Image (cartoon, grey):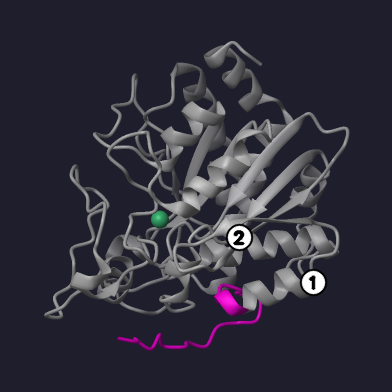
């Protein structure tokens, strides 16, 4: 069965449409070095970009589109790519402070980790209802029932067999495998995550920023990270609070912070990459701009959502330039 994905009108700078992203990566990337790191479960290309800085000691990776129903994450990364390519984002804004920081790091970006999920979801959820987004996040059973979105569950859905579903949502890849959850650290079932892990393993990365969107702005203390990472994440929060307040955007408290934080009973990509590639992982949840829950109000517009992501990236890069991730990695793994 073919399901038609509704095309919604979005501003030109909101580059989240998969075909548009592929076109941009093919036609407009001149400074970035393209790496085709693999293909999705439905054979869509996974294209990463590298912006080398020979003198830079800091090496970072920024990921968008882990979840297909979170289009702002892709649009956020594509605005970053535009900034790196032409010195201004897709709407012509300069973002001078971020650009200055970017000149000091060796950066990798992957705009869409899960293109299969992105391909079946609308380009924006701004102004739509939470329930609409939940359908695209999770999927529909053959009798048309909405699969519960289980982001907070201790026993989440790891696999939704496409044969049993009317629609497989954006938290899965095209083969129905949850892109960001698994029972064990090994093996990595989602081919997209496995491809990225193989790519990342020999890149000597200090940290990864993984962009998400659940409704409102907050960052995660990755609960499987060891004690040396906790103060780094609290530094991220302190600096971000100042920048978000200056812009009048809300930033919620650091999620999962604790002494020690309690790890979840399953594994996210954060644990896999942290353990295998010996790096720090930061997850930031931006805004979807959808309606239906008072805590998601006031509703942001597309521009504000992009600026929220660029602000999160700015703090991420700044801590990297200061060597904060490298020090925590060295203290934890004692090998670098
Ligand atoms: Zn997500």
Q: Is residue 274 left or right of residue 79?
A: left
Q: Which quadrant is the C terminus positioned in?
A: top right
Q: In this figure, which residue is indicated by the disc labeled 1? A: 28
Q: Is residue 136 left or right of residue 146?
A: right
Instruction: Name the spot of residue 17 as percent of width and height, x first.
Output: 55, 77
Q: As drawn, which residue projects farthest toward the right?
A: 55
The image quadrant in which ligand 1 is located:
bottom left
Q: Quadrant of residue 293?
A: bottom left
Magenta residues (range): 1-19
In the rendered view, would you say 270 is above or below 333?
below
Q: In this figure, which residue is indicated by the disc labeled 2? A: 111
Instruction: Name the spot of residue 40 as percent of width and height, x first.
Output: 49, 62
> Any atom of ligand 1 within 8 Å of the CB at mark 1?
no
> Is 192 part of what is drawn in magenta?
no
Q: Which quadrant is the N terminus positioned in?
A: bottom left
Instruction: Name the spot of residue 41 as percent of width and height, x first.
Output: 44, 63
Tell me, yes or no, if residue 199 can be seen here: yes
In the rendered view, would you say 158 is above or below 254?
below
């Amino acid at each position: 069965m073919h399901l038609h994905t509704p095309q919604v009108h979005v501003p030109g700078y909101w580059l989240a449409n998969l075909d548009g992203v592929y076109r941009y990566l093919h036609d407009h990337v001149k400074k970035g070095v393209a790496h085709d790191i693999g293909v999705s479960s439905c054979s869509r290309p996974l294209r990463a970009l590298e912006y080398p800085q020979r003198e830079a000691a800091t090496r970072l990776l920024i990921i968008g589109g882990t979840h297909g129903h979170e289009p702002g994450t892709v649009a956020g990364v594509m605005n970053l790519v535009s900034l790196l390519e032409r010195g201004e984002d897709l709407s012509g804004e300069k973002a001078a402070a971020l650009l200055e920081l970017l000149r000091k790091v060796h950066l990798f970006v992957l705009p869409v980790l899960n293109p299969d999920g992105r391909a079946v979801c609308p380009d924006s959820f701004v102004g739509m209802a939470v329930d609409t987004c939940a359908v695209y996040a999770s999927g529909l059973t053959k009798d048309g029932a909405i699969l519960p979105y289980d982001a907070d569950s201790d026993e989440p859905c790891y696999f939704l067999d496409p044969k049993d579903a009317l629609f497989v949502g954006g938290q899965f890849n095209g083969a129905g495998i949850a892109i960001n959850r698994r029972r064990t650290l090994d093996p990595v079932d989602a081919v997209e995550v496995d491809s990225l892990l193989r790519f990342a393993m020999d890149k000597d990365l200090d940290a990864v920023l993984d962009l998400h969107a659940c409704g409102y702005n907050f960052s995660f203390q990755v609960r499987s990270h060891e004690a040396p990472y906790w103060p780094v994440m609290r530094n991220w929060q302190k600096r971000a609070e100042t920048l978000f307040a200056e812009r009048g955007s809300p930033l919620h408290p650091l999620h999962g912070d604790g002494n020690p934080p309690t790890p979840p009973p399953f594994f996210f990509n954060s644990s896999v990459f942290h353990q295998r590639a010996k790096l720090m992982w930061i997850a930031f949840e931006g805004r979807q701009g959808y309606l239906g829950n008072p805590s998601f109000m006031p509703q942001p517009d597309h521009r504000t959502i992009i600026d929220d992501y660029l602000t999160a990236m700015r703090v991420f890069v700044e801590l990297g330039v200061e060597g904060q991730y490298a020090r925590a990695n060295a203290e934890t793994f004692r090998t670098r």
